[in-house]
Image (tube, grey):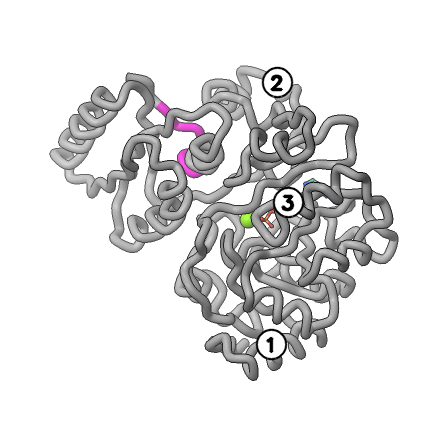
Amino acid sequence: MDTLILDPTDENIAKAAKILADGGLVAFPTETVYGLGADALNEDAVKRVYEAKGRPSDNPMIVHISRASDIGQTTRMLSPDIVNLIDNFWPGPLTLVVKKRDEIPKTTTGGLDTVAVRLPDNETARKLINLAGVPVAAPSANLSGRPSPTTYEHVVEDLNGKVDVILKGEPCRVGIESTVLDMTGDTPMILRPGILTAEQLEAAIGKKVEIDPAALRTANEMKEIAEGRKTDDVIPKAPGMKYKHYAPKAEMLIVEGARDNVKREIERLKGLNEKLGSKVGVILFEERAFIEAAHDFFARLRDLDNEGVDLILAGALSDTDGVGFAVMNRMLKSAGYNIVKV
Ligand code: AMP
Ligand code: MG
């Protein structure tokens, strides 16, 4: 398939919107990561998204809308908390999981009765969705398993020839995917951590927000589960979280501990590996520069892959619940939970 790679002019956005409305696939910028969109109401179009990405079909998609009032297209149930969250955080990097309307096909929600909805804070995205006139199902615009795309060049790398249109845009402002908040239970629960933290959400609704125990498991637990030494008794509520994710082509090891020790150990391991002929890349963010880490992390993985490194050594971010925790959630998956403590 020939992919149109277009500047985000009004004329091109209108052209892309028409293609989207007719069942085509359009990649577009958002403030979090680039998305690969299809008409959320068109099962054939949604199936083509799964095919283009090589994504397992039980991994649900986020439905994107262009104005808050359109949430009625996806759900009939709007609690005061949901309205409050929308008022405070939309447009923005917050995805709300709500009870779905019958009109949203299960192909879009990976077979679930709930649907994840978001209003992105990006003008091109909103114009596109508005002109298409339908809610837009859009996972991240990468091949399944690869790091999420934060520039349009990343999208071209993964999806050129597999989708109808790639709309160009700026590098993504946030750089990691949205916070996914489940609003269907008694207590709001973060299924996927993001740049909006539990603390910020709690401040807006005046009640406790929990973090899904599956997202809180330690690297050691995950390793034990992977190696069959422990049974997995926590079922992730965000189905996508069980899949191998964000993996660079290189091997990857995280080094965790006090800052000076981490630096020293990374240098030592780098030296040892280089002596043996390996090409080594390092990801070490400034201490507590979590926003910057979120912005750069996926792009760093792709850059190092393009440089052809064999091994990536990354310094762990020490943060238990904030933005650093959200980046660590991605870093642990990229490294296949490979971590050493110093
Ligand atoms: P991606 O589209 O790659 O950003 O991933 C979207 C993620 O949102 C999925 O992997 C799920 O973790 C989460 N998600 C989407 N829909 C639902 C839902 N109905 N219930 C729970 N989690 C969801
Ligand atoms: Mg994704």
Pinpoint residue 50: horizontal percent, then vertical percent.
63, 57
* Residue 279 vs residue 294, the one in the foreground: 294
Q: Mark 3 points at which residue?
A: 88
Q: Of the residues tagged 1 and 2, which is closer to the observer?
A: 1
For the record, the magenta segment spans: 333-339
Residue 220 in view in this figure? yes
Q: Quadrant of the N terminus?
A: bottom right
User: What amino acid is at disc 3?
Assistant: Asn
| Mark 3 secondary-structure assignment | helix
**Chain-order first, disc 1 or disc 3:** 1
Question: Which label number is shown at residue 244?
Answer: none
User: What amino acid is at disc 1?
Assistant: Ala
Looking at the image, which residue is at 25% across and 53% down?
A: 307
| Mark 1 secondary-structure assignment | helix
Question: Which label number is shown at residue 231?
Answer: 2
Question: Which label number is shown at residue 16?
Answer: 1
Q: Of the residues tagged 1 and 3, which is closer to the observer?
A: 3
Pinpoint residue 322: horizontal percent, then vertical percent.
48, 30
**Chain-order first, disc 2 or disc 3:** 3
Kindly tell me whether mark 1's CB lies below 8 Å from ligand 1: no
| Mark 2 secondary-structure assignment | loop
* Residue 303 vs residue 1, the one in the foreground: 303
Residue 129 relative to residue 77: left or right: left
Q: In which quarter of the image is the C terminus?
A: top left
